[in-house]
Amino acid sequence: MGNARAVAQLYVSAFGFSVTGYSGPETGRPERVSYVLEQGAIRLVVTAALDPADAVWDHVRLHGDGVRGLSFAVDDADAAFNAAVAHGATPVQSPAADTDERGKVVHAAVAGYGDTLHVFTERRHPGFAPGFSADGLIADRRAPRVGLEHIDHVVGNVGEGDLDRWVEFYRDVFGFEEMTHFDRDQISTEYSALRSTVMTNGRGVTMPINEPAPGRKRSQIQEYLDAYRGPGVQHVALHTPDIVTAVDAMTARGVRCLTPPPSYYDQARQRMAGLGDELAWEDLARLGIMVDREGDGYLLQVFTEPLGDRPTLFVEIIERHGAEGFGEGNFKALFEAIEREQGRRGNL
């Protein structure tokens, strides 16, 4: 991040996270500052460089604010790293331990799409990590939470023609399986399209991957790739058991969400006939929350506008009721909402 303190404050005040750890010059780390943010089982680390020689400095200079590392909790970072490299991953950081009198945390990293790192984290420490203080240096670090529970999935964007290569990467290196695939005729509008494959380890780690497909105009995926200057994480989906309450609280605190046209809800009521009679349709329409049916289950979802100045990283809030999909019935409405924003930016 360009300004970690400001971004951390955004997640605290707008999304209801708590600052549970801080690392920086005050804790003996002069080259960068980091804030640990938590809510439910979600843990984010927001970092900014203070020294131009630090790798975070170059990452922000090229990409702007975004996701540099995706951390996977493992029992043995050495074993996970060695297995990934043996199966074709490019090593970035060999296993290294941060230690103090209370224990240690071991990190190792391999390359993912673009400049994104896949980090293996082995924890044998009662706190977040050595070198972190419980004092986050943000006055209202215990702002009221909004009811976000865990990360549902993380979506990455890659260049046109690269989707199959990254599907193979997750299958061969991490042992993931293909959960579902959407071709361009399933995710398209009059102007643009994409292809997407959802990869999962079957134990709660789900990572859809998108690539742009040729269309009459520039797709949202290509706009992201141009603005981010390469592949990267497009959005992080956060699960909540009560999306109306969560989004109501977030929008009251200044979070802006994409909204489908009013006609969307007439069509959605028809799709949900016999299943969504208990839904608060007026609240869904007021907040821009979309709904999709999947067999005897359904899901509700809403997408924020980009969180930074570039049209790159955004957040999805999702509530599931027996549905494991990703809102296929909402794709067209979502694309059209994004295209309206692209048009306002002159990027469609």
Image (spheres, rainbow, N blue to C red):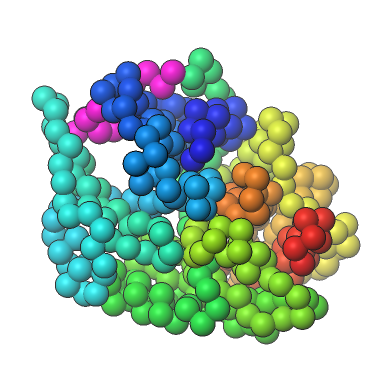
Relative placement, left or right, of 203 versus 287 is left
Quarter of the image with the C terminus in it = bottom right
Q: Position of residue 307 (x, y in %)?
A: 62, 44
Judged by its main secondary structure, the magenta piece is: loop
Q: Going by the picture, which residue comes out furthest to the top?
A: 139
Residue lying farthest front? 52
In this rendering, is residue 317 above or below 194?
above
Q: How many marks?
A: 0
Q: Position of residue 88 (x, y in %)?
A: 24, 74
Residue in the image at 50% along x and 47% along y: 61
Using the rendered image of the protein, determine whether residue 171 is visible from the camera's viewpoint: yes
- Above or below 57: residue 338: below
Q: Where residue 221 sits: x, y (%)? A: 62, 68
- Does the segment drawn in magenta span residue 130? yes
Examine the image and state in which quarter residue 183 appears: bottom right
Front position in the image: 150 or 322 = 150
Residue found at x 55% / y 78%: 160
Residue at x-position 41% and y-position 66%: 113
Point out residue 64 in the picture as x, y percentages from the top left corner: 54, 48
Between residue 277 and residue 101, name the one nearer to us.
101
Query: Is residue 174 depicted above or below 257 in this figure?
Result: below
Quadrant for residue 175, please give it.
Answer: bottom left
Numbered range of the magenta stretch: 125-137
- Residue located 33% across and 32% down the image: 31
Note whether residue 239 is visible. Answer: no
Residue at the left extreme, as displayed: 101
Does 204 sit left or right of 10 as displayed? left
- Residue 97 sits in which quadrant? top left
Does the segment drawn in magenta span residue 10?
no
